[in-house]
Image (cartoon, rainbow, N blue to C red):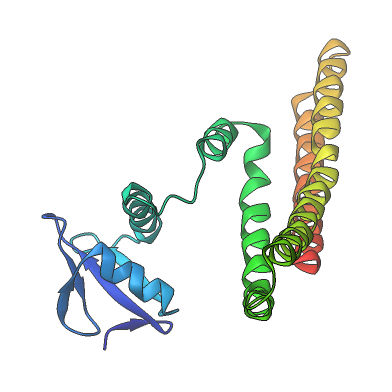
Amino acid sequence: MAKNDGATIIKKYANRRLYNTGTSTYVTLDDLATMVKEDEDFLVQDAKSGQDITHSVLTQIIFEQEAKSGQTMLPVSVLRQLISFYGDQMQMVVPSYLEHSMAAFAKEQERIREQMASMVGKSPMDVMATSQQMFGEQTQRNMALFQEAMKMFNPFAVMADMQAKSEQTGSEQGTGKAAEGERAGDDLQTMRDQIAEMQRKLDRLG
């Protein structure tokens, strides 16, 4: 099997056909969706250039799944919110939040299944109460992740404002370009340090 760090290589040709190099067979997007559900790792490459196009193919799979009747999981409101984040300052926070939120939810799946199984034979009122509590707890955990991300994100806006004011003051005072470059470098390093700290905190929350 053709592998890349344990991942099966899927080659996508110009005619949009997908070729599984592990099984030496052509596959469909539905086949790739099944592989995802079975936790089989794969990497999609452009057959001609070798470029990694896994992200675009996975996005296409989601589009195909959403288009199927009765399988929609992304409400219009969520789609609108995601679109609004592109190009926004929040864009840098959203990927980490979504990744850790989904990871936390995945960890809860087994517990959710057990709770659902324990509801068999209970009255509709008991089932409703348990379900509300179960998903309420998950929502609280997701909100904790998001609030922590927001809390860690705020310093960026403050720092950007301080940097802008510093640059303006430096210009008015005739500060040399070398000094400005040094301050910009310090600000960039500060941003990198805060991003690293934000990632460590999100890892602990997840």
Could you say which is closer to the camera, residue 177 or residue 159? 159
**Quarter occupied by residue 20:** bottom left
Q: Residue furthest left?
A: 15
x then y, percent, for residue 88? 62, 31
x then y, percent, for residue 167? 81, 22
Could you say which is closer to the camera, residue 33 or residue 171? 33
Residue 201 lies, with reference to residue 154, above or below; the image says below
x then y, percent, for residue 49? 23, 59
Instruction: Assign the N terminus to one quadrant of the image.
Output: bottom left
Is residue 198 toward the left or the right of residue 61 in the image? right
**Quarter occupied by residue 84:** top right
Residue 60 lies, with reference to residue 11, above or below; the image says above
Q: How many marks?
A: 0
Instruction: Assign the C terminus to one quadrant of the image.
Output: bottom right
Residue that appears at 62% across and 40% down: 91
Could you say which is closer to the camera, residue 49 or residue 38? 38
**Quarter occupied by residue 33:** bottom left
Residue 102 lies, with reference to residue 169, above or below; the image says below
Q: Residue furthest top?
A: 172
Is residue 186 toward the left or the right of residue 73 in the image? right
x then y, percent, for residue 170? 85, 19
Residue that appears at 35% across and 75% down: 35
